């Protein structure tokens, strides 16, 4: 099962990963802020991840790791 993880404190909340995910399982946190003061990206339904890594490729700050 693929797993997606985030170096949360590096996220700038740009939403590029959210927009590119074909399974629509990423969002910006509605209730958390990271060390930079941004709402960080998070995964809402890990089990639906297909491991395409579009999110990791798109992220300009190398926040996301996808393990297959
Ligand atoms: S690896 Fe693909 S399916 Fe999984 S969270 Fe990233 S963009 Fe979405
Ligand atoms: S693309 Fe990267 S910096 Fe932008 S919201 Fe997603 S994880 Fe954060």
Image (cartoon, rainbow, N blue to C red):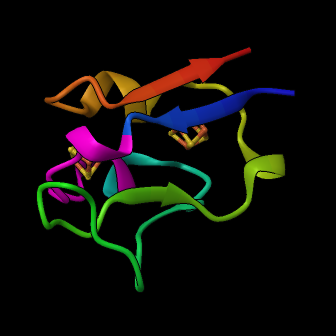
Q: Which residue is drawn at 76% across and 27% down?
A: 2
14 left or right of 66?
left
| Quadrant housing the C terminus | top right
Q: Residue furthest top?
A: 68
68 left or right of 22?
right
Q: Which residue is drawn at 28% across and 70% down?
A: 33
Q: Find residue 34 and report its image quarter.
A: bottom left
Q: In this view, does 64 lie above or below 46?
A: above
Q: Position of residue 50 (x, y in %)?
A: 72, 34
8 left or right of 43?
left
| Quadrant housing the N terminus | top right
Inspect the magenta stretch and tell me whether residue 60 lies in it.
Answer: no
Q: Position of residue 66 (x, y in %)?
A: 57, 22
Q: Residue at x 53, y 49 (%)?
A: 22
Between residues 38 and 41, which one lies in front from this camera angle?
A: 38
Q: Is residue 18 above or below residue 50?
A: below
Q: Which residue is drawn at 66% across and 26% down?
A: 51
29 left or right of 22?
left
Q: Where is residue 37 in the image (x, y as percent from the top left)?
A: 13, 67
Between residues 29 and 9, which one lies in front from this camera angle?
A: 9
Q: Find residue 10 and report its image quarter.
A: top left
Q: Where is residue 59 in the image (x, y as percent from the top left)?
A: 24, 33
Q: Is residue 16 above or below residue 45?
A: above
Between residues 17 and 10, which one lies in front from this camera angle?
A: 10
For the record, the magenta segment spans 8-18
Q: Which residue lies furthest to the front in this view?
A: 35
Q: Is residue 29 above or below residue 55?
A: below
């Amino acid at each position: 099962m693929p797993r997606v993880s985030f170096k949360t404190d590096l996220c700038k909340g740009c939403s590029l990963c959210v927009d590119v995910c074909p399974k629509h399982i990423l969002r910006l946190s509605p209730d958390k802020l990271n060390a930079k003061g941004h709402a960080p990206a998070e995964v809402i339904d890990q089990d639906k991840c297909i491991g395409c890594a579009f999110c990791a490729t798109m992220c300009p700050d190398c926040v996301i790791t996808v393990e297959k």
